[in-house]
Amino acid sequence: PLLAVTGTVVNAIGLGLATILVLVCSNTAVSIIRNIVSNAVRLPAFVMIIAAAVTCIELLMQAYAYELYQILGIFLPLITTNCVILGRADGFAAKNSVGPALYDGLIMGVGFALVLVLLGAMRELAGTGVLFAGMDLLFGPAAADWKIVVFENYQPFLLAILPPGAFIFTGLLIALKNLIDERIKKHQDALKERPVKGSKRVRVTGTIS
């Protein structure tokens, strides 16, 4: 889903919101039943909880954002197979109380949604020269005016909004993250090597009896 539907910002927001809701609901439910479900059926139970949450979100989107639901299509049910959701359910929610589990689901979902929106914005801008086109699909007719034309008379770059473009821009995001991490590490290493201000070296001579 990350690569398939992030061709525009509105698609990314729709999938991001759905993922947030699924993470919050599944983490909360898993935390509630963590002491009831045995280890033998733990993972199947978690998958069923996630699938139930995804089904509810899918039905809500059919009811209130049908046009966007048609665009996202099969990729909404595929949220069930998202490793992030199952990983947080098994790795965190199953070991913590409801409050921390809910908070973890919210934070993880927001982080995932931000990545989707950033990727969608990059691809939409590079592909069409505009941002926030079609926001009325999610937020109603009033959002139709949110469209921002960044480049006038822009020649569409279709590769950016096609699946190969998703791989390219995902690679660019990963490269940017690695570059930032490297800069931070170098800065931290430089701070460690810097002598403490006001310190002096003292030379000691003589013998110890």
Image (cartoon, grey):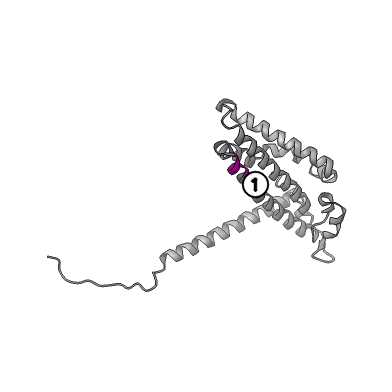
Res 125 quadrant in image: bottom right
Name the residue: 84% across, 53% down: 136
Q: Indicate the amino acid at tag 1.
A: Leu
Q: Nearer the viewer, residue 55 or 11?
A: 55
Figure quadrant of the N terminus: top right
Q: Which residue range is magenta in the image? A: 98-102
Q: What is the crowding at mark 1: few (fewer than 14 residues within 10 Å), some, or many (at least 20)?
A: many
Q: Where does residue 50 sit, x and y in percent of width and height? A: 68, 35
Where residue 121 appears, as percent x and y from the top left, is: 74, 57
Which of 25 and 47 lies nearest the eye of the viewer? 25
Q: In this view, does 124 lie above or below 193?
A: above
The residue that disc 1 covers is 106
Q: In this view, does 207 lie above or below 47?
A: below
Reply yes or no: does residue 146 show up in magenta: no
- Main SS, magenta residues: helix
Q: Is residue 81 left or right of residue 68?
A: left
Decide if residue 75 is on the left or right side of residue 43.
Answer: right
57 with respect to 136 (left or right): left
Towards the viewer: 207 or 146: 146
Q: State the residue at coordinates (71%, 51%).
A: 166
Q: Nearer the viewer, residue 132 or 53?
A: 53
Q: Where is residue 42 in the image (x, y as percent from the top left)?
A: 59, 29
Residue 8 in sight in this render = no
Residue 146 % position (x, y): 82, 59
Tell me if residue 100 is in the magenta stretch. Answer: yes
Residue at (57, 25) in percent of width and height: 40
Farthest right residue in view: 141
Instruction: Name the element at disc 1.
Output: helix
Q: Which residue is drawn at 85% across and 65% down?
A: 153
Residue 104 visible, this angle:
yes
